[in-house]
Amino acid sequence: KGGKGGKQGKRPAAPGGKGRVVYVGHIPHGFYEAQLKAFFEQFGEITRWRLSRNKKTGKSKHYAFLEFEDAGVAAIAAGAMHNYLMFDQLLQCRVMDDAEVHPDTFVGANRAFRKVPWKKLDNARRNRKRTAEEVEVQTKRLVKSEAKRRKKIAAVGIDYDFGGYVAAVSGAGGEGAGEGAEDTEQQQPETVRAAKKPKASAKQAKGVSFDAATPVGPAKAGKARKTPAAKKSQRKADEELDEELPKAKTPAKAKTPAKAKTPAAKKAKTPAAPPTTGGRRSRRQAMLSPEFKLDQ
């Protein structure tokens, strides 16, 4: 028997009919349109070929359809390649009857695969410039869905009104929005309205206008701004008053006695011992010593 689990014996005859189309299954990865046509052309001329692929990803589905020019050649190719070991797959080939062949079997055949940019096409379709009729249909659809949303909100028991697409279509979106804003502001308590007031900036809090750097509020009492002439006259009057008043003598600062410097303790120098030779005095030193004179 032939197969993955059985022994490789005599190859059985390929099942099939009298058609010219061969089904090839269990195609390994990397065996695509060009390889399929080049490999099966050794049996005879191929008129049409197509490898089935995924429409979204473009990956192979591992089966293909081949149409030979002669039905006899198709039968020979299916019988020769049935259970043929290719890489790690056993090819499954059979001749299809004419009734089995779908009219769309060879749609897009005889050409190299090209991946379709579905996302790019979808973006172009959505962003295209629409006509007046399309805009009208789209607006009706939005208004209808909004009406359903309003009914759901009312069914729950929520009293909520908003302009939405209806106000935009009727042209009263701005007025409706303004009236709704006033109503909601009147219904809100004072604490909520106070919390929503915008905070004053640092310049506004200090009373400084944005047009000029001068204080907006009233000037403080007793601190009126003086003119340069008034400042000059005040300075001259102060100088004359200083000349008339007797100058008080400031007492001289008493000099603090300087701290007595403590003499640094000098280290007592110990007299150097007379040089000795080998621990004994020399004969001359012994004669000059007072002990030697007393003995004499």
Image: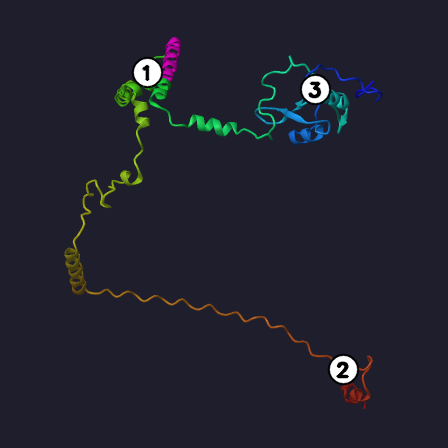
Dot placed on the residue nearer the N-terminal end, 3 or 1: 3
State the residue at coordinates (58%, 22%).
Answer: 107
| Three-letter code for the amino acid on which mark 2 is drawn | Pro
Q: Which disc, if any, is residue 71?
A: 3
Dot placed on the residue nearer the N-terminal end, 3 or 2: 3
Spot the residue most to the top. 155
Q: Quadrant of the C terminus?
A: bottom right
- Magenta residue span: 140-157
Query: Callout 3 environment at 10 Å: few (<14), some (14 to 19), or many (20+)?
Result: some
Alpha carbon separation for disc pair 3 and 1: 75 Å
- Residue 95: image quadrant is top right
State the residue at coordinates (60%, 22%).
Answer: 106
| Three-letter code for the amino acid on which mark 1 is drawn | Asp
Q: Is residue 73 left or right of residue 179?
A: right
Q: Are marks 2 and 1 in contact (CB under 8 Å)?
A: no
Residue bearing the label numbered 1: 161
| Three-letter code for the amino acid on which mark 3 is drawn | Ala
Alpha carbon separation for disc pair 3 and 2: 137 Å
Depth check: 28 or 192 in front? 28
